């Protein structure tokens, strides 16, 4: 695949539903009311970006649903353990998966032995958040900008240790795209999740990470890490002084996403109610401000929009996995 086509594929404008679509509420949405606690399953460890986002969404809709939402971490296999649990759960409206680009697009192509399918075994509820990464380094490294990093990496190929949340994850793809466009190479150190990789970066055992903003922002503000750039097309509201990577590497953009799925065959009135609640929460000024400060872009889509978005992401990721050489072996 030519470099230009790969760049175009990843830099394509992210899905954003229209204001009219967000304002629509399915007539069936009010016909289901939960009568016991709801479970949001996260396939990664507490403290990571997916876990944090899941807790923000859960808190945002708990009041309007009238029932608590419990976040349950079922970790392992790049999120597949949590996904499989939800795919096999009763489609009764009380169990959902907090999904990501990795769990509900990439993993379908990385793992040949999945016991579930990310489309057939799930019912889309809402695309909740779009996210980028932030390029962060340990303060001990001898560079302070993206251009400095590129110059150092070119002079010292493979010397910098790059941590990621695992092969084929958004951190891996963001870094691989950077390596391709900037003409540099890192030594890839995969972890089982973003949180342990971040811990090692803060401790100085790694040099660089393309981290979800939510996992790095407090370390940046506290001086434990140095931020060089964000992978979004525009600067992050929470870090307005940090340039985009694209300001140094023209055309570089990488976005990921987070959304909510239910088990397949969950009744439409339940899906409609949950989707409407998430969309309403994402329009709330207080929630929008909170998620933007964490580095996310709030969305809140209809189930139909999320289904179409996921299918498009699957096509994009299928080729990206092939081109990047991502493998779980």
Image: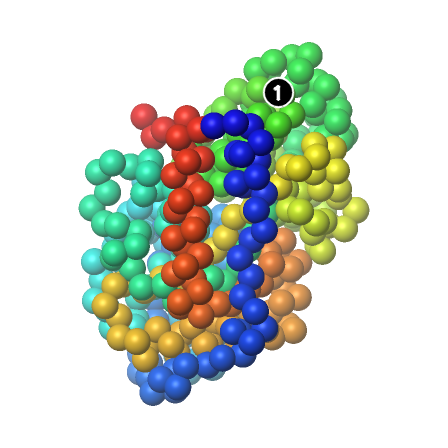
Residue 36, compared with residue 31, is above or below; it is above
Q: Image quadrant of residue 7?
A: top right
Write the residue at 65% across / 25% down.
Answer: 182
Describe residue 169's horizontal placement relative to residue 239 as left or right: left
In the rendered image, residue 62, in percent from the top left (x then y), is placed at 45, 75
Residue lying at 44% horizontally and 35% vertically, measured from the top left: 320
- Seen from the viewer's position, the closer of residues 76 and 112 is 112
Answer with left or right where residue 122 lies relative to residue 60: left
- The residue under the point 50% across, 24% down is 188
Q: Residue at x 47, y 55 (%)?
A: 258
**In the structure shown, which secondary structural element does the residue marked by tag 1 occupy?**
loop
Q: Quadrant of residue 89?
A: bottom left
Q: Residue 254 at what x, y percent from top left? A: 58, 42
Nearer-the-camera pick, 55 or 102:
102
Name the quadrant containing residue 302.
bottom left
- Regarding residue 125, the answer to whether it shows in the image is yes
Viewer can see residue 37: no
Q: Is residue 4 above or below residue 244?
A: above
Judge whether 197 appears above or below 310 on screen. Answer: above
Would you call the spot at circle 1 few (<14 residues within 10 Å), some (14-19), or many (20 or more)?
some
As drawn, the residue found furthest toward the right would be 241
Q: Which residue is mark 1?
A: 184
């Amino acid at each position: 695949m030519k470099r230009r086509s790969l760049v175009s594929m990843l830099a394509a404008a992210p899905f954003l539903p229209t204001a009219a679509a967000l304002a629509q509420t399915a007539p069936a949405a009010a016909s289901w009311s939960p009568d016991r606690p709801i479970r949001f399953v996260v396939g990664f460890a507490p403290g990571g970006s997916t876990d944090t986002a899941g807790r923000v969404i859960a808190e945002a809709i708990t009041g309007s649903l009238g029932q608590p939402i419990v976040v349950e971490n079922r970790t392992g296999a790049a999120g597949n353990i949590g996904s499989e649990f939800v795919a096999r759960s009763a489609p009764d409206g009380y169990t959902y998966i907090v999904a990501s680009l990795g769990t509900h697009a990439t993993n379908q192509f990385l793992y040949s032995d999945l016991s579930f399918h990310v489309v057939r075994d799930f019912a889309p509820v809402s695309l909740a958040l779009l996210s980028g990464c932030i390029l962060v380094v340990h303060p001990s490294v001898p560079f302070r900008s993206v251009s400095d990093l590129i110059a150092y990496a070119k002079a010292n190929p493979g010397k910098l240790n790059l941590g990621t949340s695992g092969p084929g994850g958004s951190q891996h793809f963001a870094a691989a795209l950077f390596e391709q466009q900037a003409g540099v190479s890192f030594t890839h150190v995969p972890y089982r999740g973003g949180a342990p990789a971040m811990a090692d970066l803060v401790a100085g055992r790694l040099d660089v990470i393309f981290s979800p903003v939510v996992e790095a922002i407090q370390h940046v503000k506290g001086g434990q890490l140095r931020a060089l750039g964000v992978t979004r097309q525009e600067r992050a509201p929470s870090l307005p002084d940090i340039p985009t990577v694209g300001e140094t590497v023209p055309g570089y953009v990488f976005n990921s996403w987070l959304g909510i799925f239910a088990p397949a065959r969950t009744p439409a009135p339940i899906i409609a109610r949950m989707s409407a609640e998430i969309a309403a929460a994402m329009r709330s000024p207080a929630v929008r401000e909170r998620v933007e400060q964490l580095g996310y872009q709030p969305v809140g889509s209809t189930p139909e929009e999320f289904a179409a978005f996921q299918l498009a992401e699957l096509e994009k990721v299928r080729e990206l996995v092939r081109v990047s050489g991502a493998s779980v072996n």
